[in-house]
Structure formats: C-alpha cells, structure tokens
Image: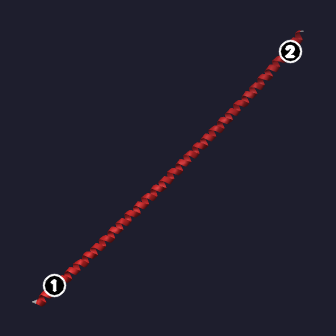
Amino acid sequence: AARNEREARERAEETAAGERQRAAQVDAVREREAEGRALEQSEEAARVEEEREREGERARRAEEQREEEAQRVKLADAEKLEEKEAEASRRSEEQAQEEVEEQKRRDEEDKARRVAEE
C-alpha cells in the first residue's frame, strides 16, 4: 500500500512537472509571439515615420520650386516692363526729335515765305 501510494505520488509529481513544463513552453511561445508582434508594430511605425519624413521633404521641395518659379515669373515680368518702358522712352525721344525737325521745317518755310514776300 505504501509502495502504491509512493508510486501514485511519483506519477502525480511527474504529471504536475509535465504540466508545468508544457505551461512554461506555452508561455514561452506566447511571449515569442508577443515579441514578434511588438517588433512588427515597431517596424511599421518606423516605416510610417519614414514615409512621413519623405512626404514632408517632397512638400518642402515642391514649395521651393513654386517659390523659384514665382521669382522667375516676377523677374521676367520686371524685364518685360523694363523693355516696355525703354521702348516707350525711345518712341518718346523719336517723337520729340520728329517734332523738333517738323518745327525746324516750318520755321524754314516761314523764313522762306518772308524772304519771298520781301
């Protein structure tokens, strides 16, 4: 009876040890799975942050390009205005010269008429 009792106790201890070992293995597997999920989440967060940074850089470059283009347009407009002003000034000078020449011609005609009348 003592032997049966001892054998039963040993079997119970072996069974309990086996169950503890299996529980420890299950816990280890669950822990590895949780670590794997945490690593995946961390990697995904890093990818998302990297994409945000790339998008920010693209937006910054696009804004710089818009500003550069606006500056080029502004400069081109200023050059066109300068050309128009120069052309207007040239025309004004030509017109003034033509008026002077016209006045000289009229003065000479008036002088010639007076000389002819005298």
Disc 2, SS: helix
Amino acid type of disc 2? Lys
* Residue 48 vertical placement versus 24 (above, below): above
Residue occupying image coordinates x 56% and y 45%: 67
User: What is the spatial separation of the Cα atoms under label 2 and label 1, in whole angstroms?
Assistant: 150 Å
The quadrant in which residue 1 appears is: bottom left
Q: Which residue is mark 1?
A: 9
Q: Which residue is mark 2?
A: 111
Circle nearer the N terminus (2, 1)? 1
* Residue 54 vertical placement versus 102 (above, below): below
Residue occupying image coordinates x 18% and y 85%: 10
Q: Is residue 38 left or right of residue 90?
A: left
Choose between 42 and 10: the one closer to the eye. 10
Q: Is residue 115 left or right of residue 41?
A: right
Disc 1, SS: helix
* Residue 62 vertical placement versus 50 (above, below): above
Q: How is the image coloured?
A: secondary structure
Spot the residue most to the left: 1
User: From the image, which quarter does the C terminus lie in?
Assistant: top right
Q: Is residue 91 left or right of residue 24?
A: right
Q: Nearer the viewer, mark 2 or mark 1?
A: 1
Amino acid type of disc 1? Arg
The answer to whether mark 2 and mark 1 are in CB contact below 8 A is no
Residue occupying image coordinates x 28% and y 76%: 25
The quadrant in which residue 15 appears is: bottom left
* Residue 96 vertical placement versus 1 (above, below): above
